[in-house]
Image (cartoon, rainbow, N blue to C red):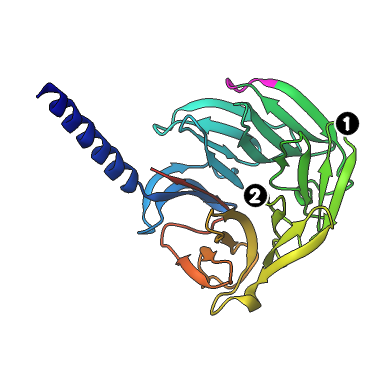
Amino acid sequence: MIGRYFKYLFFIAMISTYCSCNNSREKLLVSGCGWKQVAILDKKTGEIEWSHPLAAHEDCNDVEITKEGNILYAYTSGARLIDREQQTLWDFKARKGEELFTATQLPSGRYMLAICGTPSRIIELDPQGQPVEEIEFDTSITGVHDQFRQIVKTPQNTYLIPLMGKGEVVEMNKEKEIVNRAECGGNPFAIQILKNGNWLVSCGDAHNFVEIDPDSKQIVRKVGSDDLQNISLLFVAELVRYKNGNTLISNWNGHSKDKSQPLLVEVDSDNRVVWTLPLHPDIVNISAVYSFKE
């Protein structure tokens, strides 16, 4: 009898766990240059569930949820880690004349910041937000604002840098040597390493995104407005590549007079539009997006 009782409890626990997992919903952490908010949206409804105000001079171009569930974002003059109660856990300030656009948590638990400047800098912080490592490097781009937005650190401890002012992606090692480079056109904003090793790059005002084979340095896929039905891509900012092959596009409208286009666009591997976030009364534009479930 006791054995049956424990089997019953185990069965109920399994059903509860299954239902809990299947009740999770996709959420989107978003922000955008020119919009003074960091917000969490329910993707299905498009409604804002949580928001965090930014100051007038703070433009956010990178957001993410950390493995601890906190919210990390860059805001031009610095980077900040906050909790869901909007308490600041740490706040890193860039130097005068610098612009900070990359803020991400590394697998080690450290945080990586990338800062445009003369020189540019990549800084790693410990979990408490204290600097522990720094690399200074030269992009050969004079205008600080035109240098880069989102830099990625690879598993090989190199850095993929989308150079906005040059229309190319370079791979730099810790000795500041360029070990690979590939042209992509436009003013590349963000980069993601795909499972097959290709680079997924958003190309800004070229109005497209591309996939690059880093070995051949060739573009193996390009998706722009002409490939999509009834959608115009404006400034293509941060992308999310889903496990099913779909791509979520931040369709930032800050450089365009056309304010009628959706803020986010999801396309499948055949370039069919499968979801959009239409214009929203409380959202100006979106250039940074991070997908998660809860």
Q: Is residue 25 magenta?
A: no
Residue 45 on image: x %, y %: 35, 59
- Residue 227's disc is none
Disc sitting over residue 175 in the figure: 1
Apparent side of residue 194 relative to residue 42 in the rendered image (left or right): right
Distance, label 1 to label 2, CA atoms, is 26 Å
Count of number-bearing discs: 2
Q: Which mark is first along the chain, 2 or 1? A: 1
- Magenta-colored span: 127-131
Task: Confirm whether residue 233 shows in the render.
Answer: yes
Q: Can you see residue 166?
A: no
Q: Tell me: 100 left or right of 23.
A: right
Picture quadrant of residue 153: top right
Report the predominant secondary structure element of the magenta stretch.
loop
Residue 195 tag number? 2
**Mark 1 and mark 2 residues within 8 Å of each other at the beta carbon:** no
Amino acid at circle 1: Glu
Please name the residue shown 82% across and 62% down the image: 218
Q: Amino acid at mark 2?
A: Lys
